[in-house]
Amino acid sequence: MRRILLPIAALYAAACVTANAQVLYSTGFEEFTLGPIVNQFGWEQQLSNTGGRGDGSIVDNFARSGDKSLKITPISGTGIGSNWWWRYSPHDTSASPNKIIRIKWDMYLTSSSVQGAYGIDVYNGAGVLTRVCSARVLENNQVQLIYFENGTATMISNLNLFAQRNRWNRFRMDIDYTTRTFKVYLNGVDVDPNGNYPIQYSAGPVFGDADVWFVNPNGNANDSAYYDNYYVAAIRAVVDGDVNGDGCVDDADLLAVLFNFGSDDIVSDVNDDGTVDDADLLTVLFNFGSGC
């Protein structure tokens, strides 16, 4: 992934600091036109120079919410390689009270004879381009995290948790720039409750973007992935029942759950099981007043 990085001063202005959480970017892809996502609403792409290329396009034949989604399709006849699609959404955690980046997305992987790997790849937003951390589903459906030992050496952890193909899976990644660690959840389940996964120190305090990431590990993948409800926010704290991420479970969180009750709204879905229901409402009520 390559792009021009802006000075920190410009990044700070791009993400206005308030006492509440900040939604850096959120889309269900409904506002996009059909066809390639690149050059729409600031989205960019990088395709591998060595092959393994994929197509990232907006389609209207399949989605978790609404009518549209982003479909990643391997291009037949290309070799092994990686591809990225992203929208630059910077946030300077050193200048903001919101030092946790929350990324949520829905992902549907089709099953096929040769499967690729799909996920989210996080990069910094100032200085030399540096990966922060990553989460993806491998070709064998296993969840994999990429992190950094002592903040510098790249480490890979293949977990004993598997995503299901041919169904929607809801993911959440919380990156804490204070502790310099991150956690990942799949359909509301912590992918490694005992794990401690550090981000890369040299990435610095400025979050840049969360890339949609495709890897063609065998060079001939013939599956596909659909992404929907892509959401990136800078939040105050991780508190059970805190829908809006301001660090306090209050009336605003209760109203958000009630207004979206029965839907698959990715923000109000507190437990990330795919539906805003009684479980989410009870979580808010049981934790009402927490963090305030």
Image (tube, rainbow, N blue to C red):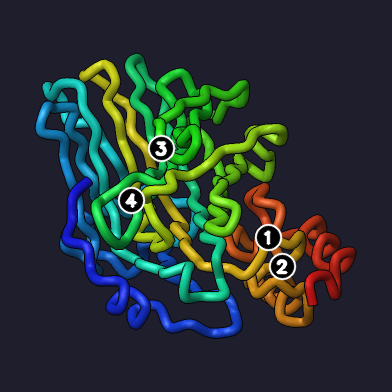
Mark nearer the viewer, 1 or 4: 1
Label 1, label 2: how many angstroms apart (C-alpha)?
8 Å
Q: Residue at x 31, y 47 (%)?
A: 130
Name the mark on residue 70. 4
Q: Secondary structure at mark 3?
A: loop
Reading the image, the residue beneath label 2 is 242
* Residue under pointer 1: 238
Q: Is disc 4 in contact with disc 2, using a CB cutoff of under 8 Å?
A: no
| First of labels 4, 2 by sequence position | 4
* Kind of residue at disc 4: Leu
- Tell me whether circle 3 and circle 1 mark residues in contact (CB < 8 Å): no
Image side of residue 86 versus residue 96, left or right: left
- Residue 6, image x, y percentages: 23, 69
Q: Amino acid at mark 2?
A: Asp
Judging from the image, what secondary structure is the residue with disc 4 in?
Answer: strand
**Foreground pick, 79 / 133:** 133
- Report how far apart the C-alphas of labels 3 and 1 lie in the structure: 25 Å
